[in-house]
Protein backbone atom coordinates (compact mmCIF):
# COMPACT_ATOMS: atom_id res chain seq x y z
CA UNK A 1 0.00 0.00 0.00
CA UNK A 2 2.99 2.32 0.57
CA UNK A 3 1.14 3.92 3.49
CA UNK A 4 3.66 4.71 6.21
CA UNK A 5 1.10 5.65 8.84
CA UNK A 6 -1.37 3.90 11.10
CA UNK A 7 -3.88 1.46 9.61
CA UNK A 8 -7.23 0.52 11.14
CA UNK A 9 -9.15 -2.37 9.61
CA UNK A 10 -12.71 -3.46 10.27
CA UNK A 11 -13.81 -7.08 10.58
CA UNK A 12 -16.47 -6.97 7.88
CA UNK A 13 -19.31 -7.31 10.39
CA UNK A 14 -21.11 -4.17 9.24
CA UNK A 15 -20.67 -5.10 5.59
CA UNK A 16 -22.30 -8.46 6.33
CA UNK A 17 -25.10 -6.60 8.12
CA UNK A 18 -25.72 -4.59 4.95
CA UNK A 19 -26.15 -7.75 2.86
CA UNK A 20 -29.47 -8.60 4.49
CA UNK A 21 -30.97 -11.75 2.98
CA UNK A 22 -27.66 -12.76 1.38
CA UNK A 23 -26.17 -13.78 4.75
CA UNK A 24 -26.54 -16.62 7.24
CA UNK A 25 -25.26 -16.16 10.79
CA UNK A 26 -24.29 -19.16 12.94
CA UNK A 27 -22.16 -19.77 16.01
CA UNK A 28 -19.20 -20.53 13.78
CA UNK A 29 -19.38 -17.31 11.80
CA UNK A 30 -21.10 -15.75 8.82
CA UNK A 31 -21.84 -17.29 5.45
CA UNK A 32 -22.80 -14.88 2.71
CA UNK A 33 -23.01 -14.57 -1.04
CA UNK A 34 -20.86 -12.17 -2.98
CA UNK A 35 -22.84 -9.33 -4.51
CA UNK A 36 -20.43 -9.47 -7.45
CA UNK A 37 -20.72 -13.06 -8.68
CA UNK A 38 -23.00 -14.87 -6.21
CA UNK A 39 -20.22 -17.10 -4.90
CA UNK A 40 -20.44 -18.29 -1.29
CA UNK A 41 -18.02 -16.82 1.25
CA UNK A 42 -17.48 -17.57 4.94
CA UNK A 43 -16.03 -15.43 7.71
CA UNK A 44 -15.22 -16.85 11.13
CA UNK A 45 -13.73 -14.87 14.04
CA UNK A 46 -10.47 -16.73 13.47
CA UNK A 47 -10.39 -15.93 9.75
CA UNK A 48 -11.12 -12.26 10.39
CA UNK A 49 -8.15 -12.06 12.77
CA UNK A 50 -5.89 -14.03 10.42
CA UNK A 51 -6.55 -11.58 7.57
CA UNK A 52 -5.94 -8.55 9.78
CA UNK A 53 -2.77 -10.10 11.22
CA UNK A 54 -1.50 -10.63 7.68
CA UNK A 55 -2.35 -7.05 6.72
CA UNK A 56 -0.33 -5.79 9.67
CA UNK A 57 -3.11 -3.50 10.86
CA UNK A 58 -2.23 -1.31 13.83
CA UNK A 59 -5.82 -1.49 15.09
CA UNK A 60 -7.94 -4.56 14.36
CA UNK A 61 -11.62 -5.15 15.00
CA UNK A 62 -13.19 -8.34 16.29
CA UNK A 63 -16.06 -9.92 14.37
CA UNK A 64 -19.46 -8.73 15.52
CA UNK A 65 -23.11 -8.75 14.49
CA UNK A 66 -24.81 -5.39 14.06
CA UNK A 67 -28.57 -5.81 14.51
CA UNK A 68 -31.13 -3.73 12.67
CA UNK A 69 -32.88 -0.81 14.33
CA UNK A 70 -36.14 -2.15 15.71
CA UNK A 71 -34.83 -5.66 16.39
CA UNK A 72 -36.55 -7.42 19.29
CA UNK A 73 -35.05 -7.62 22.75
CA UNK A 74 -34.70 -11.41 22.48
CA UNK A 75 -32.87 -11.32 19.18
CA UNK A 76 -30.68 -8.42 20.24
CA UNK A 77 -29.69 -10.22 23.46
CA UNK A 78 -28.72 -13.40 21.60
CA UNK A 79 -26.80 -11.38 19.03
CA UNK A 80 -24.94 -9.40 21.70
CA UNK A 81 -23.92 -12.60 23.50
CA UNK A 82 -22.73 -14.09 20.20
CA UNK A 83 -20.64 -10.98 19.54
CA UNK A 84 -18.99 -11.40 22.95
CA UNK A 85 -18.19 -15.06 22.28
CA UNK A 86 -16.74 -14.12 18.92
CA UNK A 87 -14.57 -11.46 20.62
CA UNK A 88 -13.10 -14.13 22.91
CA UNK A 89 -12.33 -16.33 19.91
CA UNK A 90 -10.73 -13.38 18.12
CA UNK A 91 -8.53 -12.71 21.15
CA UNK A 92 -7.46 -16.36 21.28
CA UNK A 93 -6.63 -16.38 17.56
CA UNK A 94 -4.65 -13.12 17.66
CA UNK A 95 -1.02 -13.88 16.80
CA UNK A 96 0.60 -10.49 17.34
CA UNK A 97 -0.97 -8.76 20.36
CA UNK A 98 2.20 -6.84 21.24
CA UNK A 99 2.19 -4.91 17.97
CA UNK A 100 -1.43 -5.00 16.78
CA UNK A 101 -4.28 -3.80 18.96
CA UNK A 102 -7.48 -5.85 18.85
CA UNK A 103 -10.60 -3.87 19.82
CA UNK A 104 -13.86 -5.38 21.03
CA UNK A 105 -17.16 -3.96 19.75
CA UNK A 106 -19.96 -3.15 22.18
CA UNK A 107 -23.37 -4.13 20.84
CA UNK A 108 -26.82 -4.38 22.41
CA UNK A 109 -29.05 -2.45 20.06
CA UNK A 110 -31.27 0.17 21.64
CA UNK A 111 -31.37 -1.54 25.07
CA UNK A 112 -29.28 -0.03 27.86
CA UNK A 113 -29.09 -3.20 29.96
CA UNK A 114 -27.76 -5.18 26.99
CA UNK A 115 -25.21 -2.51 26.15
CA UNK A 116 -24.06 -2.50 29.77
CA UNK A 117 -23.72 -6.30 29.76
CA UNK A 118 -21.82 -6.19 26.47
CA UNK A 119 -19.43 -3.50 27.71
CA UNK A 120 -18.71 -5.20 31.04
CA UNK A 121 -18.11 -8.60 29.45
CA UNK A 122 -15.70 -7.12 26.91
CA UNK A 123 -13.86 -5.15 29.59
CA UNK A 124 -13.13 -8.48 31.31
CA UNK A 125 -11.08 -9.45 28.24
CA UNK A 126 -8.74 -6.51 28.98
CA UNK A 127 -8.49 -5.48 25.34
CA UNK A 128 -6.39 -2.45 24.30
CA UNK A 129 -9.43 -0.50 23.13
CA UNK A 130 -13.20 -0.66 22.76
CA UNK A 131 -15.57 0.33 19.98
CA UNK A 132 -19.26 1.19 20.13
CA UNK A 133 -21.20 -0.38 17.29
CA UNK A 134 -24.82 -0.54 16.27
CA UNK A 135 -25.56 3.20 16.41
CA UNK A 136 -26.43 5.65 13.63
CA UNK A 137 -28.36 2.92 11.81
CA UNK A 138 -31.70 4.70 11.56
CA UNK A 139 -32.60 5.44 15.17
CA UNK A 140 -33.71 8.96 16.24
CA UNK A 141 -30.81 11.32 16.83
CA UNK A 142 -31.71 11.96 20.49
CA UNK A 143 -31.76 8.22 21.19
CA UNK A 144 -28.38 7.76 19.55
CA UNK A 145 -26.85 10.51 21.69
CA UNK A 146 -28.43 9.05 24.84
CA UNK A 147 -27.13 5.54 24.18
CA UNK A 148 -23.74 6.85 23.10
CA UNK A 149 -23.26 8.81 26.32
CA UNK A 150 -24.52 5.90 28.42
CA UNK A 151 -22.23 3.36 26.75
CA UNK A 152 -19.12 5.53 26.64
CA UNK A 153 -19.34 6.12 30.38
CA UNK A 154 -19.10 2.35 30.95
CA UNK A 155 -15.77 2.00 29.14
CA UNK A 156 -12.29 2.53 30.65
CA UNK A 157 -11.10 6.13 30.37
CA UNK A 158 -7.47 5.04 29.98
CA UNK A 159 -8.12 3.13 26.73
CA UNK A 160 -9.32 4.39 23.33
CA UNK A 161 -13.10 4.62 22.96
CA UNK A 162 -14.20 4.42 19.36
CA UNK A 163 -17.61 5.35 17.90
CA UNK A 164 -18.01 3.41 14.68
CA UNK A 165 -19.67 4.76 11.57
CA UNK A 166 -20.27 8.44 12.29
CA UNK A 167 -18.72 11.22 10.21
CA UNK A 168 -20.90 14.32 9.96
CA UNK A 169 -19.44 17.33 11.80
CA UNK A 170 -22.27 17.43 14.36
CA UNK A 171 -22.07 13.70 15.13
CA UNK A 172 -18.29 13.98 15.54
CA UNK A 173 -18.50 16.91 17.95
CA UNK A 174 -21.34 15.31 19.92
CA UNK A 175 -19.31 12.10 20.19
CA UNK A 176 -16.28 13.86 21.63
CA UNK A 177 -18.43 15.80 24.08
CA UNK A 178 -19.54 12.40 25.39
CA UNK A 179 -16.00 11.10 25.82
CA UNK A 180 -15.30 9.37 22.51
CA UNK A 181 -11.69 9.41 21.25
CA UNK A 182 -12.04 8.01 17.73
CA UNK A 183 -14.63 7.98 14.93
CA UNK A 184 -14.76 6.79 11.34
CA UNK A 185 -17.08 7.05 8.38
CA UNK A 186 -17.19 6.81 4.59
CA UNK A 187 -18.94 10.18 4.48
CA UNK A 188 -16.11 12.44 3.17
CA UNK A 189 -15.55 10.29 0.07
CA UNK A 190 -19.18 9.22 -0.40
CA UNK A 191 -20.48 12.78 -0.60
CA UNK A 192 -17.49 13.70 -2.78
CA UNK A 193 -18.75 11.17 -5.32
CA UNK A 194 -22.04 13.09 -5.29
CA UNK A 195 -20.32 16.43 -5.86
CA UNK A 196 -20.57 17.75 -2.29
CA UNK A 197 -17.94 19.56 -0.21
CA UNK A 198 -17.85 20.20 3.53
CA UNK A 199 -16.88 23.78 4.37
CA UNK A 200 -16.71 25.96 7.48
CA UNK A 201 -19.95 27.58 6.31
CA UNK A 202 -21.88 24.41 5.58
CA UNK A 203 -22.15 21.99 2.68
CA UNK A 204 -21.49 23.16 -0.88
CA UNK A 205 -23.12 21.02 -3.57
CA UNK A 206 -20.67 22.05 -6.24
CA UNK A 207 -22.39 20.08 -9.00
CA UNK A 208 -25.30 22.56 -8.84
CA UNK A 209 -25.72 24.96 -11.78
CA UNK A 210 -25.04 28.04 -9.63
CA UNK A 211 -21.32 27.11 -9.53
CA UNK A 212 -20.89 26.72 -13.30
CA UNK A 213 -18.92 29.96 -13.63
CA UNK A 214 -17.81 30.33 -10.02
CA UNK A 215 -14.09 31.13 -9.97
CA UNK A 216 -13.83 31.08 -6.17
CA UNK A 217 -12.40 28.23 -4.13
CA UNK A 218 -14.45 25.68 -2.23
CA UNK A 219 -13.59 27.22 1.14
CA UNK A 220 -11.52 30.36 1.69
CA UNK A 221 -10.62 29.12 5.19
CA UNK A 222 -9.16 25.83 3.93
CA UNK A 223 -5.48 25.17 3.21
CA UNK A 224 -5.88 21.88 1.33
CA UNK A 225 -4.38 21.11 -2.09
CA UNK A 226 -7.77 21.47 -3.77
CA UNK A 227 -8.53 24.89 -2.34
CA UNK A 228 -5.05 26.15 -3.19
CA UNK A 229 -5.25 25.13 -6.83
CA UNK A 230 -8.79 24.71 -8.18
CA UNK A 231 -12.02 26.71 -8.48
CA UNK A 232 -15.58 25.65 -7.80
CA UNK A 233 -16.43 26.07 -11.46
CA UNK A 234 -13.64 23.78 -12.64
CA UNK A 235 -14.45 21.12 -10.05
CA UNK A 236 -18.10 21.28 -11.16
CA UNK A 237 -16.98 20.76 -14.75
CA UNK A 238 -15.01 17.67 -13.70
CA UNK A 239 -17.95 16.22 -11.76
CA UNK A 240 -20.44 16.86 -14.57
CA UNK A 241 -18.03 15.28 -17.07
CA UNK A 242 -17.62 12.20 -14.81
CA UNK A 243 -13.91 12.85 -14.50
CA UNK A 244 -12.39 10.95 -11.57
CA UNK A 245 -10.17 13.91 -10.75
CA UNK A 246 -13.22 15.84 -9.54
CA UNK A 247 -14.08 13.14 -7.01
CA UNK A 248 -10.46 12.99 -5.87
CA UNK A 249 -10.21 16.74 -5.40
CA UNK A 250 -13.43 16.83 -3.35
CA UNK A 251 -12.26 13.84 -1.29
CA UNK A 252 -8.96 15.56 -0.54
CA UNK A 253 -10.82 18.66 0.58
CA UNK A 254 -13.41 16.84 2.70
CA UNK A 255 -10.77 14.79 4.48
CA UNK A 256 -8.72 17.91 5.20
CA UNK A 257 -11.81 19.70 6.49
CA UNK A 258 -12.53 16.90 8.96
CA UNK A 259 -8.92 16.57 10.13
CA UNK A 260 -8.80 20.35 10.61
CA UNK A 261 -12.05 20.15 12.58
CA UNK A 262 -10.53 17.46 14.79
CA UNK A 263 -7.42 19.57 15.35
CA UNK A 264 -9.67 22.40 16.50
CA UNK A 265 -11.71 20.09 18.74
CA UNK A 266 -8.53 18.92 20.50
CA UNK A 267 -7.53 22.52 21.17
CA UNK A 268 -10.97 23.35 22.54
CA UNK A 269 -10.91 20.28 24.81
CA UNK A 270 -7.53 21.35 26.19
CA UNK A 271 -8.93 24.84 26.80
CA UNK A 272 -12.13 23.46 28.37
CA UNK A 273 -14.09 25.33 25.72
CA UNK A 274 -15.67 22.56 23.60
CA UNK A 275 -19.31 23.42 24.35
CA UNK A 276 -18.80 27.08 23.44
CA UNK A 277 -17.00 26.08 20.25
CA UNK A 278 -19.85 23.69 19.41
CA UNK A 279 -22.44 26.46 19.62
CA UNK A 280 -20.32 28.85 17.54
CA UNK A 281 -19.56 26.20 14.92
CA UNK A 282 -23.18 25.06 14.64
CA UNK A 283 -24.33 28.63 14.03
CA UNK A 284 -21.65 29.20 11.41
CA UNK A 285 -22.20 25.84 9.72
CA UNK A 286 -25.96 26.24 9.53
CA UNK A 287 -27.09 23.73 12.13
CA UNK A 288 -30.11 24.76 14.17
Image (spheres, grey):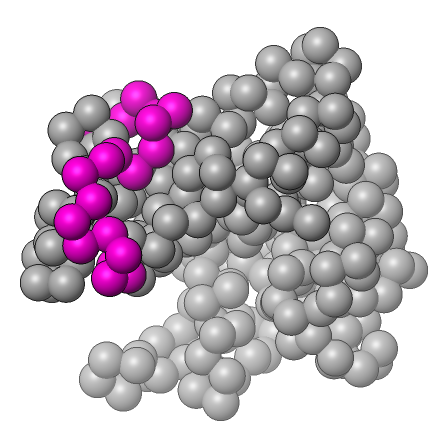
Residue found at the far top of this picture? 271
The rendered magenta stretch, by its main secondary structure, is classed as loop
Name the residue nearer the viewer: 122 or 243: 243
Q: Position of residue 91 (x, y in %)?
A: 58, 45
Name the residue nearer the viewer: 239 or 132: 239
The N terminus sits in image quarter = top left
Q: Which residues are magenta?
A: 207-225
Name the residue nearer the viewer: 164 or 168: 168
Q: Residue at x 41, y 33 (%)?
A: 257
Camera sees residue 125: no
Q: Residue at x 31, y 80 (%)?
A: 34
Q: Residue at x 70, y 40 (%)?
A: 174
Is residue 150 inside the magenta stretch? no
Q: Position of residue 45 (x, y in %)?
A: 51, 59
Q: Is 73 above or below relative to 58?
A: below
Q: Position of residue 222 (x, y in %)?
A: 35, 26
Q: Is residue 23 left or right of residue 108?
A: left
Q: Position of residue 188 (x, y in %)?
A: 38, 48
Is residue 216 inside the magenta stretch? yes
Camera sees residue 265: yes
Amino acid sequence: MHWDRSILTDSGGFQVFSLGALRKITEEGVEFKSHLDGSTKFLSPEKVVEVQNDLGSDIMMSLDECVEYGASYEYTKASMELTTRWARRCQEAHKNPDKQGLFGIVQGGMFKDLREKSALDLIELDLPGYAIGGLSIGEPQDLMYELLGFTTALLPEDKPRYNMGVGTPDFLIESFIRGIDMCDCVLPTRIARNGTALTWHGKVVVRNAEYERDWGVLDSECDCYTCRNYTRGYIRHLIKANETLGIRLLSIHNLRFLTKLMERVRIEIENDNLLTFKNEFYKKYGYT
